Image (cartoon, grey):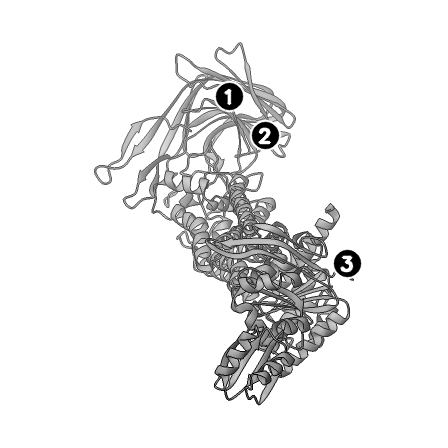
Amino acid sequence: MSGEAIIEVTGLRKRFGPAVALDGMSFTVRPGRVTGFVGPNGAGKSTTMRVVLGLDAADEGTALVGGRPYRSLREPLRHVGALLDAAALQPGRSARGHLLWLAHSQGLGARRVDEVIEQVGLRSVARRKAGGFSLGMRQRLGIAAALLGDPPVFMLDEPVNGLDPEGIIWIRDLLRSLAAQGRAVLVSSHLMSELQGAADHLIVVGRGRVIADTGVADLITAASRGRVTVRTPEPERAMRALARAGAAGTVTEGDELTVSGLPGERIVAVLTAHAVPFSEVMAQRVTLEEAYLELTRDAVEFHAATGREAVR
Amino acid sequence: MTFAYGARSFARLSRAEWTKFRTVRGWVLGMVAAVLVTVGLGLFAASGSHSSCGGPDDVCPAVPIGPDGQAVDDKFFFVHRALNGDGSITVRVTSLTGRIRLPDVTPGVRREVPRVEPWAKAGVIVKDGTRQGAAYAALMVTGRHGVRLQHDFVHDTAGGRSGVSETAPRWLRLVRSGGELTGYESADGRRWAKVGTARPQGLPATVRIGLFAACPGDLTVTQADLGGAIAASRFAQATAVFDHVSLQGEMSGGAWRHDDIGAAKEPDGAIHHPGGVVRTGGTFTVTGVGDIAPRTDGQTIEKTLSGLLAGLIVVVVVAVVFVTAEYRRGLIRTTLLAGPRRGRTLTAKAVVIAAVTFAAGLIAAGVTVPLGAHVLRANGNDILPVGPLTELRVVAGTAALLAVTAVLALALGTVVRRGTVAITGAIALVVLPRVLATTSVLPVEASRWLLRVTPAAGFAIQQSIPAYPQVTAFFSPQAGYYPLSPWAGFAVSCGYAALALALAVLALRRRDA
């Protein structure tokens, strides 16, 4: 499965009129892990997915699935399972009817349809018209369609959107189990919190290109590195003393400083040497969400800072 | 990419499109509605169409039927003898004159002028008896179409172009050999030119052989005030003078006899517009009224399909929505994920809508045409009969026309991606020209051009009675006569559908989905 279970995107560029949608988007989605594809709205996530799936044509660059362009795949749903827009359903057609035509297009039969209906838990509503489905049911139907061809690669655009907490847990478990089977799983979201606990690896994009391509743990470490919170009744004096020792600091609350450039032990030593009283010196651990927000706050600045990570 | 894979992939995509179609109840019901509308309106119109001929028992005279099964006009003056086996007849025609009645200026006062109808005809004929509709072969001079050899009503072979006058008489010879009749013409009775050979159906050993004269009514076509045209036919007769009449072969039954074949009787028993013969020595002067030709006025089987346009509009709506609904919902992306070869995917869709529509059309026309014709006949209407192959062509052709129109509509829907725009466009391309051309709103020639150059040309496939060039009649679109032959017209519609589909494939390939 591993040879087929890979998405390779190289140097994609695309403009919609004057707007640059993709500006040299490059990344590789590897098998055996859930890769989160995050970035603010308009960062180029959906466009990239559409290009990979042969729906949109890029002006430049290549996008390969298992080493081949999507449009050249035979029975493509057996190679890639995709969920782009859960609302894309004919309202008058039943869930089963929807899956059945998809199955027939790939040479699959009704039995496989019933299997995936079972797998996503839609059996009781399989013969109901999809027009009456809630967003959560539509998401499940979309996942069922992606599962239909038992593909080595999954690409899901905002699959958690609209799911209830139970559904979110269900989809996380499903994605992790698909990855554990050695498949490549790419999941996009504009909210990092949705991917927390599900993604092992992150591709962070902004303004049509990759800002960071990194493991979840590395990202948090990188974002937290060297930041220390200092609580002191005399923040002005503390700032002066720490600045002289080569650290940068800002007052975040009345008696709280965020200091970078010095490790915690040196800060304690400097403050003690200058007889600045303090009640707390604590190294910061940012959340994934905070790390992400920091990354995407200014895409260009952090692109350079994390370039090393992207190459690795 | 092998051909076998391509074929298998196409079959799968077609099956998927069929599954798509049948799993949306609205679309299936749409097709059923198209069938019901076509059948219902057709039978409703047929049941409301009554015809009667008056008189004490209100029975219309039977329309004569020719050897090929079609309704015929068979009315002429016949001077004849019996011929057993092979033989021939040779005559010299020294004149062909005629009289035509013009519209009355003073009511009730006939205005007749001497004039020869272009298709006035006189000459020699061999016929299977004197029954109307019996097989025959005739060699004739005509008012303006030269010498012709005609047989069994529909067959017509042209001979020399020259007319007849006392200074330039024309010799005619018709030779029977078994079932074959050969016509010859000559200017001087010595050098003969062969006109052609005819094989009338089932000619018996003993036939009637002799002279005849006939003349179709004079046709005037006037432009109507509000477009369209009005055709009127008035009385006309032809008189031919024959001499040098010579017969060869075994004659039986004695002297010459004469019959006014197909003559209509007045209530008092007198013949309406009688023909006649005057014999002076070896000269025969024969006067005839009527025509020996296939009948072209009367109800046709395709008239039963009056509900088809309504059915067609329903089909157009379903075909357009079959694709535009996918654009509206974004489902087109799912379709293209399953079948990323876009030309193949769209073609599969077109094949499915064509097949579904063809099946629906076959049911609709297959029920309406025979049943509608039955109802019309039961109501006393005469329907011009056609052979089973022609009826099959009308029924299957109607179904095929629906299918082709559905493909055109689907292609339009793919190009413009908007349901209402595509539906309006398809109706404007197919239904509108047909309505304009067949109702009396446009000049006839404009109607004909519409039916040549628009996708409505395909309606010609429904025309069951051909427009015979040798028949004096006003073959207008309003009367159901199309400017193109059935298959040529159908080919025009197919061309439009193919072009639209090609453009749709191009657009689909070039666009981001």
- Which mark is nearer the camera, 2 or 3? 3
* Whether residue A167 is visible: yes
Determine if marks 1 and 3 fall on one subunit.
no
- For marks 1 and 2 on the same chain, the one whose residue lies earlier in the sequence: 1
User: In the structure shown, which secondary structural element does the residue marked by tag 1 occupy?
Assistant: loop
Chain designation of label 3: A
Task: Find residue B96 and report its horizontal and vertical position in percent.
Answer: 40, 22
Separation of disc 2 and disc 3 at Cα?
89 Å
- Name the residue at 48% across, 35% down: B468
* Residue type pointed to by label 2: Val
User: In the structure shown, which secondary structural element does the residue marked by tag 2 occupy?
Assistant: strand
* Residue type pointed to by label 1: Gly
User: In the structure shown, which secondary structural element does the residue marked by tag 3 occupy?
Assistant: loop
Determine if marks 2 and 3 fall on one subunit.
no
- Whether residues under marks 1 and 2 lie with C-beta atoms below 8 angstroms apart, the answer is no
Please tell me whether residue B452 is drawn above or below residue A188 in the rendered image: above
The answer to whether B235 appears left or right of A163 in the picture is left
Chain designation of label 2: B
Location of mark 3 (residue): A3
Task: Find residue B237 and report its horizontal and vertical position in percent.
Answer: 38, 30
Task: Find residue A16 and report its horizontal and vertical position in percent.
Answer: 49, 55
Dot 3: few (<14), some (14–19), or many (≥20) neighbours within 10 Å?
few
Front-lying residue, A213 or B478? A213
Q: Work out which quarter of the rendered image holds the C terminus of chain B and state it.
A: bottom right
- Which mark is nearer the camera, 1 or 3? 3
User: Any mark on residue B69, and which?
Assistant: none
Please tell me whether residue A233 is drawn above or below residue A145 in the rendered image: below
Front-lying residue, B350 or B188? B350
Location of mark 1 (residue): B159
Separation of disc 1 and disc 3 at Cα?
81 Å
* Residue type pointed to by label 3: Gly
Chain designation of label 1: B
